[in-house]
Structure formats: C-alpha cells, structure tokens
Image (cartoon, rainbow, N blue to C red):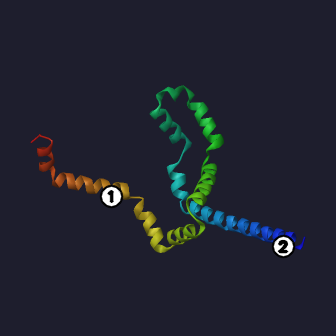
Amino acid sequence: MQKIIIILCLLTLTAGTALADQTSHRKLAIQLVRIYEKDIDSNYSITNEVNNLINHNPRLKPYRQALTTFMKKYLSNNQLKGYLVLAFMQQFPEDKLKEIVEFLSSPAGKLWREKSSNFGQTINNITGAVLTKHRDELMKLLGKQ
C-alpha cells in the first residue's frame, strides 16, 4: 500500500510539473505572437482572405457573404493568434522558443524584424539589377538579340 501511495505522489508531482511546463511554454508562445502582433494585424484581414479564396476559385463569388460570416466566426484576428500560439508550441520546444523570443526582443532581433520585412523588395532589387547587368547574355540565350 505504501508503494502505491508513493507512486501516486510521484505521478501527481510529475503531472504538476508537466502542467507548469505547459504553462511556461504557452507564455513563451504568447510572447512570440505579441512580438509579431503588428505584422499579423496589418497583413491579415478577413476581407483579403475571402478575396483571395474567390480569386483562386471564382465559383465561390456568390458565397462571398457566407464566407465572410464564417471566417468572422472562426478566424478573427484574435482566434488566429490563438491558433498561432498552439502552432508555436507544437513547432518549437520550450527552450528553443525561449531563445527565439529573447533574440527577437533584443536590439539585434528588433533590427532583424525591421529589415527582414523588406526582404521581398531587396530580392526584387537584386534580381532586377542582375538581369539588367546581364541583359545581353539573357537575350542571346532566349534567341532575341
């Protein structure tokens, strides 16, 4: 009987530790979502998402209002952020999530976030410059000189 009580105590302590770990892991995931909150709010809108759905499948056009109502019910910005918290918890172990949050909260991380948001434009500038520089070679390859 004493062994059973000890085992039950150990299981209870382990469950409490797992719950505490889960709570700290969740807090880190929430911090990461908050770091990207402005980006999420500026890049995600139900109207844009519905428009994208309809652009990819024009047969959905008559259902625009129904899609909008559905997405407002299940995919508001706050709900999306909740899903992101769960995704971050699944994708990153707690120790790595802590490192990511610490980095992104640092001055270097803030600079990284600021500059990395312009990567698309930077890549476009680079490819444009390379294509211009080697235009003659490209035209020769395309047989259009």
At label 1, which amino acid type do we have?
Thr
Q: What residue type is labelled 2?
A: Ile
Helix, strand or loop at label 2? It is helix
Q: Position of residue 42 (x, y in %)?
A: 51, 52
The image shows residue 66 at horizontal and vertical percentages of: 61, 31
Q: Where is residue 100 in the image (x, y as percent from the top left)?
A: 52, 68
Question: Neighbour class for label 2 at 10 Å: few (<14), some, many (≥20)?
Answer: few
Where's residue 81, x and y in %? 60, 53
Compared across the picture, whether 53 is left or right of 145 comes to: right
Q: Is mark 1 on a helix, strand or loop?
A: helix
Closer to the eye: label 1 or 2: 2
Using the image, determine if residue 132 lies above or below residue 100: above
Residue wearing tag 1:
122
Residue designated by label 2? 6
Please indicate whether residue 14 sits to the left or right of residue 117 in the image.
right
Q: Which mark is residue 139?
A: none
Q: In which quarter of the image is residue 6?
A: bottom right
Point 26% across, 54% down: residue: 127
